Each structure stands twice: as C-alpha cells, then as structure tokens.
Amino acid sequence: MESRTEARGQRAGAVDPEVDAARHAIRVLSRPRMTGSPGAAEVELLLRGAFEEQGYEVQELPFQFSAWPGRFGVSALGAVTLLGLGAATYALASSRPGTALIALAGVALFAGLAALFARRAIADLPWGRIEGKNLLAVRPGARPRYLIVAHRDSKSQPISTFLRIAAMVLVGFAWCALLTVAAIGSYDTGLISLPLVLSAGSLGSVGGVLLASSVAGNASAGALDNATGLVALLGIARRQRDYGDVAFLVTDGEELGLAGAWDAARRLPPLEGIINLDGLDDYGDFRITERVGPTQRRVLAPHLAAALLASAASLGVGAERRDLPLGILVDHIPFGRAGFPALTLLRGTARSLFRVHRRSDTPDRLTGLGAMLTVSLVCGALDLLRSGRLRAS
C-alpha cells in the first residue's frame, strides 16, 4: 500500500515546477543510446551543455573496449547452460550419472571462467571494439571529496531484467537438483528419480532459453534506466554548484560490462565517497546497495549509507540497505574494487524490473518525482557528511 508520505509527494509532484522540469528532462534524454550510437552522441552533447551552463568544467575521458562480451555474453552462457543441462538430463534418464556429472562440471567451468575473465575480455578482445567516453564535471579549481555518478548509455533485450533474474534462478536450481541426483546415482542408479530429473531439466531448459535470447540491442529509450539517474545527477549538480567538494561523473558503456566505470576507477584521485544513481522510479522505497552478492567480494561504504538513511528519514521517505540482486551489475562495483567507498542508490518495485531493458521503458511512465526526491535525498546526505555529525554503521 502506498505510504501517506509518498501519496502526498505524488500529489505535490503534479504541480511542483521542479518535478515538471525533471519529467521534461527525462523525455529529452530518453532515446536509444547504446555506446557508439547516434543517440549516445546526442545525449553526450546535451549533458555537456547542461553542466557547462551551470559553470562546471567538463573533461572527456575516452576509452576503447570490446562490446562483444556485453552484447553476447549472457546469451552465450545461456546456450552453454542449455546444452549442458540438456546433456545431464539425458544422461541421468539413461542411468549414466558419471556422464551427467561431467556435463554439469562443464557448465560450472564455463560460467566460472566467464566471470573470471569477463573484465579482461571487455578490455582486450580485438573484435567488436568501440570507443566510449566518460564525462567528468568539476568546479573550476576545485578538489572534490565526493563523486556522484550516473551512466548515460542504454540497451534493449528481448526479456526484461526481472525475467533474466528469474532465468538465472531457474538455471541455478536445475543445476543443483541435477547435481544432487547425479551424486546419489553414482552410488546406486536405482535411486535416480526420473520425474525429478525431467522436471529439473525442463526448468533449466526454460531458464537457458531465456538467457540465450538475451542479446543486447539498441531499441529501448532507457527512461527509467537511466535517464532518471542522469536527471537526478544534473539536479544535484545544480544545487551543489556553490560547493567545490562534489564532482559528477557520467559513465559510458555501463550496459556493456561496466566498461566506463572500470576505466574511470583507475584514473580517479582519492575520494571520500562515490554515490552511483541508477534506476529511480516514482514508486517504491529507495535501496542503498553496497555489498555485492554472497559469493563476491563485499564493497562497503558505511558512512555514505548512514548519511543517505538519515537524509531519507528527515524527508519522510522509505530507504533500506540491500545487497545487489543476483545478476545485476552497477557502476559502483568497479569503484569499490579499486578501493573507493562506493554504493548505488536505486528506487522502484519489482514491477520496475519488468520494463528495464525493454521497449516499454518509456518516459510517459514517469512523472519525474523519483528523480527529484533523489536530488533532495543526496543533497541532504552531502550536508550531513560535511557536518561530521554522522555515526556510520
């Protein structure tokens, strides 16, 4: 049920000139803009002009990378998974658990190697290379302590982010179930349950097909992901233009393996905190994501999280700390791995994930309220950080 605070905010947003301006800005920035496309170049010019109009110096940070892993990596994983799980299902149905174990090990090996070498492949593969361009906006002569980040590129896929996450869950469940049956069957083939094998194999096949279809294209306007983040970034820059301790980074290539953030992470000077903005819907609680999954290195920025939570409480809006969901990549990950205190701020519900990376991610489904609440939230957090009255937890 919608909270009273949010309901009042929605009604106020209908007449709030800042919210109306945010809605207009989201419409202007929402267009297919995969890295290297004409739409990406158009949005770059718009962002550069907006920063320069507010008195910021804009520095270009160009980089080159291979787009192939970002465009075809998930679909390749889906194809290998489909083949491996299918082979394991057939082997178990034929009472050959040893063959099934080999097939399942092959799937795990491919997935592990893909995760291990994905970053290197993006940086070094000679095929599908394109040029991206990050934009760094700083007040003249300033030495920033904090950095606010949002990515400007978009992508489209045949399935939504929600279905992609569901597909990964299905594949993971099927792999574990088949592995368990294969391990038991290695001791006694009579214990192999054919209905369980066929059910697990079917679920895995559905997940594999969904993943295999996930080739990245350039057909989404990217309103929620991430025109909202860009508009919030510009709004924060407008309110913070009298402070020299905040800089703003617009990354490119986020949708193709976080390519821009990986490149920027090696160029930045020491900073006290990085706040990444990504997907700021009009409904739902804010989500402060620091930690990256149960099996990956944990990235923490407790002082930033504490400031954002305190700012949200003062505004009367919901906010909570959450781990990143399985399969979601955001730009604070490279910064955290490089040693910067970094986190990502998101806002939305499960329904938001249904339209991310889809043609349905259009600006007419947004009022601009989420972006403008983010401006107030982050500016309040920055004021608290400057005051030194916070206790991180």
Image: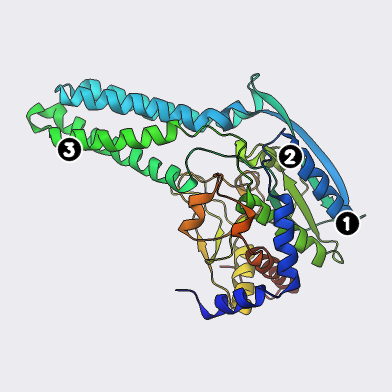
Q: Residues within 10 Å of mark 1 (few under 14, many from 20)?
A: many
Q: Residues within 10 Å of mark 2 (few under 14, many from 20)?
A: many
**Quadrant housing residue 358:** top right
**Quadrant housing residue 308:** bottom right
Residue 196, disc: 3
Q: Position of residue 344 (x, y in %)?
A: 61, 55
Q: Would you place residue 107 above or below residue 169 in this image?
A: above
Circle nearer the viewer, 2 or 1? 2
List the single residue furthest toward the front. Answer: 364
Q: Are marks 3 and 1 in contact (CB under 8 Å)?
A: no
N-terminal of the pair, mark 3 or mark 1, is 1
Drawn side of residue 104 relative to residue 112, left or right: left
Q: Position of residue 80 (x, y in %)?
A: 40, 25
Residue 272 is at least partly visible in this image: no
User: For the residue marked with disc 1, what is the amino acid?
Assistant: Arg
User: For the residue marked with disc 2, what is the amino acid?
Assistant: Ala
Estimate the spatial distance between the alpha carbons at disc 3 and disc 1, rounded to whole Å.
62 Å
Residue 40, disc: 2
N-terminal of the pair, mark 2 or mark 1, is 2
Q: Are marks 2 and 1 in contact (CB under 8 Å)?
A: no
Identify the residue shown where x is 30% and y is 28%. 85
Give the camera-side residue of 292 and 242: 242
Drawn side of residue 338 relative to residue 209, left or right: right
Q: Which residue is mark 1?
A: 139
Identify the residue shown where x is 34% and y is 24%. 83
